[in-house]
Amino acid sequence: MMAALSPLAPARFPELSPIAGVRLAAFACGIRYAGRNDLMLAELTPGSAIAGVFTRSMTAGPPVLWCRDCLSGGV
């Protein structure tokens, strides 16, 4: 059963302006929710610089650990 929609959820989201060298897509994969987008894919042009901000929690979940491993110097 899906949780009720939060009363703090926005009624709609603004349209995102295109960003040169970035392609975004969202898919309904059933990872977390049934019948709604729950996976986002970003494609960046070769040579793009990326950065991440991570939790300092000692109990970081697998997605955070994976992202840390993907970024050189991820701590």
Image: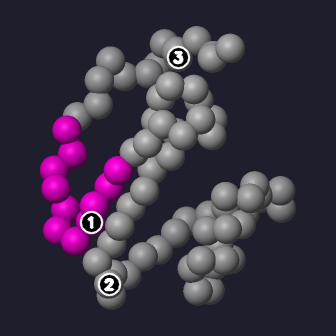
Q: Residue 64, image x and y in percent?
A: 67, 61
Q: Which residue is mark 3?
A: 6
Disc with the residue nearer the chain's start (3 vs 2): 3
**Residue projecting furthest to the right:** 58
Do the numbered discs 3 and 2 sit on residues whose CB atoms are within 8 Å?
no
SS at mark 2 in the image:
loop
User: Over which residues does the magenta segment extend?
Assistant: 15-25
| Picture residue at 54% right of the left edge, 40% below the top | 29
Quarter placement of the C terminus: bottom right
Q: Residue 52, image x and y in percent?
A: 52, 69
Relative to 46, say whether 9 is above or below: above
Q: Which residue is mark 2?
A: 46
**Label 1 sits on what residue type?**
Val
Side (left or right) of 68 relative to 43: right
Residue 8 in view in this figure: yes
Disc 1 crowd, CA 10 A, few/some/many (<14, 14-19, 20+) = few
Give the distance between the C-alpha atoms of the residues marked 3 and 1, in whole angstroms.
Answer: 30 Å
Q: Which mark is residue 67?
A: none
**Label 2 sits on what residue type?**
Pro
**Label 3 sits on what residue type?**
Ser
Residue 55 in view in this figure: no
Disc with the residue nearer the chain's start (3 vs 1): 3
Q: Which residue is mark 1?
A: 22
Give the distance between the C-alpha atoms of the residues marked 2 and 1, in whole angstroms.
Answer: 10 Å
Disc 2 crowd, CA 10 A, few/some/many (<14, 14-19, 20+) = few
| Picture residue at 43% right of the left edge, 56% below the top | 41
Q: Which one is closest to the eye, mark 3 or mark 1?
A: 1
| Picture residue at 19% right of the left edge, 38% below the top | 15
SS at mark 1 in the image:
strand
